[in-house]
Image (tube, coloured by chain):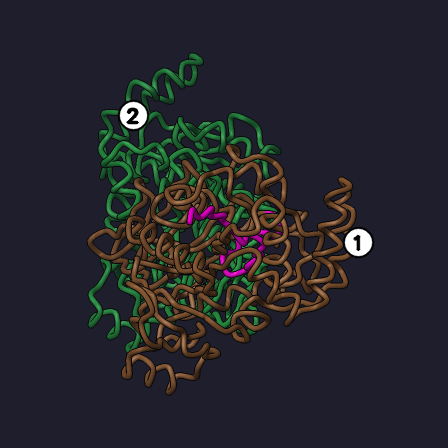
Chain colours: A brown, B green
């Protein structure tokens, strides 16, 4: 059987943890945050193209970000970027992409991938994609499970079952984000992997599941399919989307499906959850600082500074400080509080300050 | 006797502790660093004008700063700013100003004042100036001694002698910057005041002292006087200045003079020695932060941020951090290291970086 694979890159995020670099109109996936200096989405597309042809890549984003998204991957055709009129979590996003693929090839396999993660080992990543696509072509609902290296409470876990093929296991169950104690138990016990948010399934298989478990979304997709035949897809999406339930593909489909498989993986993954990740992934100087090439540090350690091109940054006597400077806003945050950058964005929104 | 007083504002400083706001072509006295938001030099002139008419104010600065200095006090005439071709410490500066005053009025009293200090109680400051001018008119060499409130090792001290008039004492001796132990002894003993660097004397009296104690400078002043009569002052200054000895008015004259008096004072003085002073003097929020009006602080304490107009600054989880942002350079320094900002300037100079 010849498998035709399609990538569905979920690029609708509007995270606030990378403020002030990230803004409503320029969220994380449109920024260069990792060590390669590439825009996150562009790096994701480049990695995927090693396994899936560029013409088979779809990117789903919000209507407000569609133009900036297309500009970030100019070699893709305009209609490879699907623009959701409103965000409704990941299930409608995957359903629409699956319907789009199904009209071209119902047997096509979807690789649903986040736009804004960092991958350290791209060779291994390519091998994992191929393995997961092959398992999905056989009819499984496949996820990638990442080898945990700390008792992380911010991710969901997958309990690994018996092997079903080389590098592929039955997934016994999905586990919600655990508390610290359970996360430590998972790490000690082994056999639990982080849910990567990467999913692989045949278009016809996921659409069938959606019709069973998420019938309103299924019905909407049938209507969109019919409209596409009349050249009225965009207006139909515009009309139907606001009424779709907001539900994740994890909860809505994967946790209810049978024949769920997991491909264990370890490819230097990071979800780049905050500026701390940007510091961790970048090249450090001898005092573990991450600065632009002409930056100066005196008696400073484990700190990070990102400033506009050509600007000089100088640190004196600071430790564990993250500095992000842009044209109109400057953030200085202690590493212990990197998650609390969201509080700044919340305060700006509360006072109708446009710099969010 | 009617006393005509002249102010001589020493504005040749080129400090580096306020980098990156201060630069070679825009040193501390040309910046607004105090709580009033005025340029330091302009505030100094404004305070002095309560006691001395504007036409009697002279400002001595370097030739490279003359234009910017005149721009900072546009209501003064151009020839009220004396431009030294090279810096030779304060004795030549005072000598030249004294010679300039002496040509107008040999009995004129000079009030020699720093350009870049902060004065909290301007009423008391005016009273002290009047008292010191009156004592100088009687023929004394007068200094202002500031009531110490900590065992400061960065200033010289003056030992106070017997009273000679209301609010005026004989100065027993000048004491060099002491070590910590001696500074603590001075504070405990009482009777020791900080040397403010403010001096008052009649023009003829200080010129006579200069001829005795600093004869090369005295001879140069005679030559400059003669040249001034021929309209050739500027070229003569240009020719003579580089060969003058570099010596302070404290060491060169005051410490050797007889009839030295001190006016004890307590007028909310600060020499604004570093960004810590700027933080100390400004209005604090409830967490002791000093931020622009639209700045945001979350879980942050005792910190300071100065950014270009219109720019937003946000602090999260930082304590005792000083932040100074300009168009082309950003400094983040811990308060414990505020003096070490000079190290940054030294490193920039060492690599011929123009941003000093």
Q: Are marks 2 and 1 in contact (CB under 8 Å)?
A: no
Is residue A179 one of those drawn in magenta?
no
B222 in relation to A189, above or below: above
- Give residue A239's mark: 1
User: Front-most of A328 and A276?
Assistant: A276
Q: Nearer the viewer, mark 2 or mark 1?
A: 1
Q: Nearer the viewer, residue A352 or B235?
A: A352
Q: Quadrant of residue B20?
A: top left
Q: Position of residue A66 (x, y in %)?
A: 63, 44
Front residue (pair A273, B193): A273
Residue A311 percent location from the top left of the image: 41, 39
SS assignment at label 1: helix
Q: Counting other residues with Cα less than 10 Å from the Cα at mark 1, is it few (<14), some (14-19), or many (20 or more)?
A: few
Residue B332 % position (x, y): 39, 54
* Secondary structure beneath label 2: helix
**Considering only vertical position in the picture, is A324 above or below A276?**
above
Magenta-tinted stretch? A1-25
Which residue in the structure is indicated by mark 2?
B241
B48 left or right of A211 in image:
left
Query: Which chain does the residue under circle 2 lie in?
Result: B
Residue B121: tell me if it is visible. no
Look at the picture and state if A317 lies above or below A256.
Answer: above
Mark 2 surroundings: few (<14), some (14-19) or many (≥20) residues within 10 A: some
- Marking on residue A169: none
- Residue found 42% across the figure and 12% down from its top: B230
Task: Estimate the spatial distance between the alpha carbons at disc 2 and disc 1, rounded to whole Å.
Answer: 83 Å
Q: Which SS type dominates the magenta stretch? A: loop
Residue A232 in view in this figure: yes
The residue drawn where x is 65% and y is 47% is A83
Q: Quadrant of residue B176?
A: bottom left
- Quadrant in which the C terminus of chain B appears: top left
Is there one chain holding both mark 2 and mark 1? no
């Amino acid at each position: 059987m010849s498998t035709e694979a399609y990538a569905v890159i979920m690029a609708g995020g509007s995270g606030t943890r990378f403020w002030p670099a990230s803004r409503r109109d320029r969220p994380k996936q449109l920024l260069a945050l990792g060590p390669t200096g590439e825009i996150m989405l562009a790096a994701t597309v480049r990695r995927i193209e090693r396994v899936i042809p560029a013409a088979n890549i779809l990117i789903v984003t919000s209507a407000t970000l569609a133009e900036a998204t297309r500009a970030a991957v100019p070699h893709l055709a305009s209609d490879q970027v699907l623009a959701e009129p409103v965000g409704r979590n990941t299930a409608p996003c995957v359903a629409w992409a699956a319907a789009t693929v199904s009209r071209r090839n119902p047997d096509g396999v979807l690789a649903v991938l986040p736009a804004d993660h960092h991958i350290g080992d791209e060779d291994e990543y390519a091998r994992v994609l191929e393995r997961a696509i092959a398992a999905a072509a056989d009819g499984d609902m496949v996820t990638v499970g990442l080898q945990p290296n700390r008792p992380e409470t911010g991710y969901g876990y997958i309990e690994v079952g018996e092997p079903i093929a080389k590098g592929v296991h039955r997934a016994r169950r999905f586990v919600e984000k655990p508390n610290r104690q359970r996360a430590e138990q998972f790490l000690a016990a082994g056999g639990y992997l982080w849910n990567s948010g990467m999913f692989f399934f045949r278009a016809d298989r996921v659409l069938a599941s959606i019709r069973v478990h998420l019938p309103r979304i299924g019905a909407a997709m049938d209507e969109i399919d019919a409209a596409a035949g009349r050249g009225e897809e965009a207006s139909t999406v515009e009309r139907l989307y606001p009424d779709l339930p907001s539900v994740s593909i994890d909860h809505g489909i994967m946790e209810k499906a049978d024949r769920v498989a997991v491909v264990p993986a370890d490819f230097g993954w990071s979800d780049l959850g905050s500026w701390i990740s940007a510091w961790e992934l970048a090249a450090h100087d001898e005092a573990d600082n991450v600065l632009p090439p002409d930056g100066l540090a005196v008696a400073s350690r484990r700190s990070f500074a990102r400033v506009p091109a050509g600007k000089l940054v100088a640190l004196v006597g600071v430790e564990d400080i993250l500095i992000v400077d842009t044209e109109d806003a400057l953030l200085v945050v202690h590493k212990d509080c990197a998650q609390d950058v969201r509080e700044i964005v919340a305060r700006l929104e509360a006072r109708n300050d446009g710099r969010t």
